[in-house]
Amino acid sequence: MNEGPGRSAPYAGLGGQDPRVPPRATPPEPSSSTRPIAASSQSAAPAASAFVPLLLLGIAFAGWTVFQTVELAGERANLHAVRTAQQAQVDQSQRLRTALSSLATDTQRLADGGDAGAKQVIDRLHQNGITVNPNAAPVAPPPP
């Protein structure tokens, strides 16, 4: 074929390659595992540093510790609030217990003195598993 100054190449739109001829295959680039290693071209790989993983571990531990401390401080405050709210009921129950104990002690003294009604009450208490010690020291009620 004649390619002159006024003529275009017959396969110019195809990059100048004849479509009937298969393109030449180029050999694949050798991978790093198949390349020959020259002793002089081998550079020493940098050693892996444990600084970054240990730093992340330390930050995670510190964060977890701070989180647990904040949560425990909140729980402590809640428990203190509950205890303060219950203190009035505890004081009231102690006053009632002191009053009932002194009533039972006085009833036992009356029963020991020969009062028939007091003996019935004390016998009923014994049947229910309640013992009354008239010699016990009286418990002082808590301050109101």
Image (cartoon, helix red, strand yellow):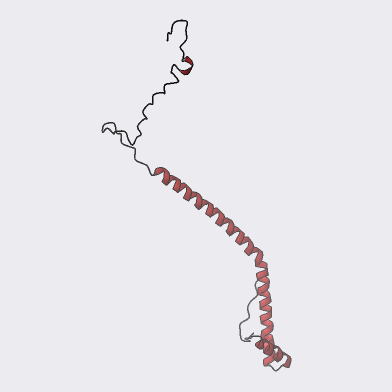
Return the residue nearer the eye: 120 or 22: 22
What residue lies at 67% left-to-right and 73% top-to-bottom? 93
Return the residue nearer the eye: 48 or 3: 3
Look at the image and tell me in which quarter the N terminus lies: top left
Return the residue nearer the eye: 8 or 56: 8
Residue 21 lies in quadrant: top left
Side of 99 relative to 13 (left or right) = right
Q: Is residue 8 shown above or below 110? A: above
What residue lies at 71% left-to-right and 91% top-to-bottom? 120
Q: Position of residue 42 (x, y in %)?
A: 29, 33
Side of 64 relative to 105 (left or right) = left
Q: Is residue 117 shown above or below 67? A: below
What residue lies at 69% left-to-right and 87% top-to-bottom? 107
Side of 72 relative to 11 (left or right) = right
Q: Position of residue 33 (x, y in %)?
A: 33, 37
Residue, far left: 39
Residue, far top: 5
What residue lies at 55% left-to-right and 53% top-to-bottom? 70
Q: Position of residue 95 (x, y in %)?
A: 67, 74
Q: Is residue 2 shown above or below 105? A: above
Return the residue nearer the eye: 93 or 5: 5
Does residue 143 appear in this view?
no
Residue 80 lies in quadrant: bottom right
Q: Position of residue 129 (x, y in %)?
A: 64, 85
Side of 88 relative to 58 (left or right) = right
Total marks shown come to 0
Residue 22 lies in quadrant: top left
